[in-house]
């Protein structure tokens, strides 16, 4: 299965990167932008007997290494890969060519 | 006294720490290899500055799993003295030997300059050779030195006196423009609850000779020597006074 982990600075913790990006977006004229936080996206392949077991393993990975619970929050998604792993997204989604 | 300076892949300041201890201070300091588990009977372990494991994932996150860190954690839990400088401080936080964490500087820039830090608690093994409120001038060089900890934890740490160093101006006043990296409450160095583990972002090993621009870093090392050399004497004195009663 394919695991996608999204790590972001914990809410309420100062995120200097997020603040700098927010200021830059505003100075480019993007109105209505707020609470920008810059995090990390980790993708990994995992052999697990079930999605539930996979979830439990990923939670332990996040607690022990992938995140620092003092300063970071995380969410993750698990995709089972057996079904047509070669399937590509609609090319129209890839932008202009 | 016997010191060990841990060498991780990517450590930079290990040789400077060894120089400060051996050549400048006449101590018996030796390098400790990250793959070893033997602390060779040292009385204080120094985790030096640098970029251990390339700062991959988070600063200090990978170093925490080095074989020697198992022994360092055991040593610290048994009351052994551990000093973490810069990247060493980050490693101690990741290893949960110190509370809190270090994040990207608020300027988002790497900072290399001399700063002033005030001794907030002079009654610890790491600060006992300094005066309460004394201002030391020490160099910093880091990109991720902004100290954070949960608000309730921070309050408890302040009450227990675990904040040992705070960034101030030369006169010892807290000012926002004297806080180089935006650390919460201008915190530059913290100890654990039992005061045998200390982490700080400034580099005492780079301020041990006039030729380096200052000697204030000696205060930290002298404190450790004082506390180690005093402890066995105090203990034996207590034992003899008890037996005489």
Image: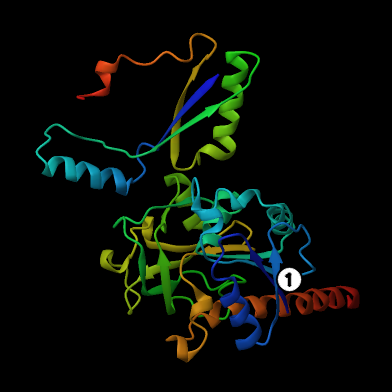
Residue under the image location 70 percent in, 66 percent down: B32
Residue A33, picture quadrant: top left
Is residue B50 shown above or below B100?
below
Q: Is residue B161 visible?
A: no
Is residue A74 shown above or below B156?
above
Q: Is residue A27 left or right of residue A43?
A: left
**Residue designated by label 1:** B43
Which chain does tag 1 point to?
B
Quadrant location of the C terminus of chain B in the rendered image: bottom right
Give the farthest residue toward the right.
B243
User: Could you say where residue A66 lies in the image, as x and y percent from the top left?
Assistant: 53, 37
Is residue B211 shown above or below B61?
below
Give the farthest residue toward the top.
A83
User: Could you say where residue B200 lies in the image, as x and y percent from the top left?
Assistant: 50, 65
Is residue A75 shown above or below B105?
above
State how many labels appear: 1
């Amino acid at each position: 299965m394919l695991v996608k982990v999204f790590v972001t600075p914990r809410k309420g913790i100062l995120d200097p990167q997020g603040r700098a990006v927010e200021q830059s977006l505003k100075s480019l004229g993007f109105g209505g932008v707020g609470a920008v936080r810059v995090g990390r996206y980790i993708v990994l392949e995992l052999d697990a007997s079930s999605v539930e077991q996979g979830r439990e393993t990923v939670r332990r990975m996040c607690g022990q290494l992938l995140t620092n619970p003092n300063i970071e929050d995380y969410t993750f998604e698990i995709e089972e890969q057996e079904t047509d792993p070669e399937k590509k997204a609609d090319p129209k989604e890839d932008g202009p060519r | 006294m016997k010191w060990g300076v841990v060498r991780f892949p990517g450590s930079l300041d290990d040789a400077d720490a060894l120089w400060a201890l051996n050549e400048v201070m006449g101590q018996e300091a030796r390098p400790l290899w990250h793959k070893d588990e033997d602390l060779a009977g040292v009385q204080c372990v120094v985790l030096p500055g640098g970029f251990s494991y390339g700062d991959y994932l988070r600063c200090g996150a990978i170093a925490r799993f080095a074989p020697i860190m198992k022994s360092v954690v055991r040593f610290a839990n048994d009351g052994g003295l551990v000093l973490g400088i810069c990247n060493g401080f980050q490693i101690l936080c990741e290893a949960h030997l110190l509370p809190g964490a270090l994040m990207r500087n608020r300027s988002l820039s790497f900072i290399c300059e001399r700063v002033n830090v005030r001794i907030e608690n002079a009654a610890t093994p790491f600060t006992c050779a300094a005066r309460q409120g004394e201002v030391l001038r020490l160099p910093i060089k880091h990109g991720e030195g902004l100290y954070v900890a949960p608000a309730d934890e921070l309050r408890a740490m302040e009450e227990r006196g675990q904040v040992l160093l705070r960034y101030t101006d030369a006169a010892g006043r807290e000012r926002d423009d004297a806080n180089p990296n935006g650390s919460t409450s201008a915190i530059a160095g913290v100890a654990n609850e039992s005061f045998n583990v200390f982490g700080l972002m400034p580099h005492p090993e780079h301020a041990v000779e006039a030729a380096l621009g200052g000697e204030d870093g000696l205060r930290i090392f002298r404190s450790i020597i004082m506390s180690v050399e005093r402890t066995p004497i105090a203990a034996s004195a207590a034992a003899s006074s008890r037996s005489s009663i």
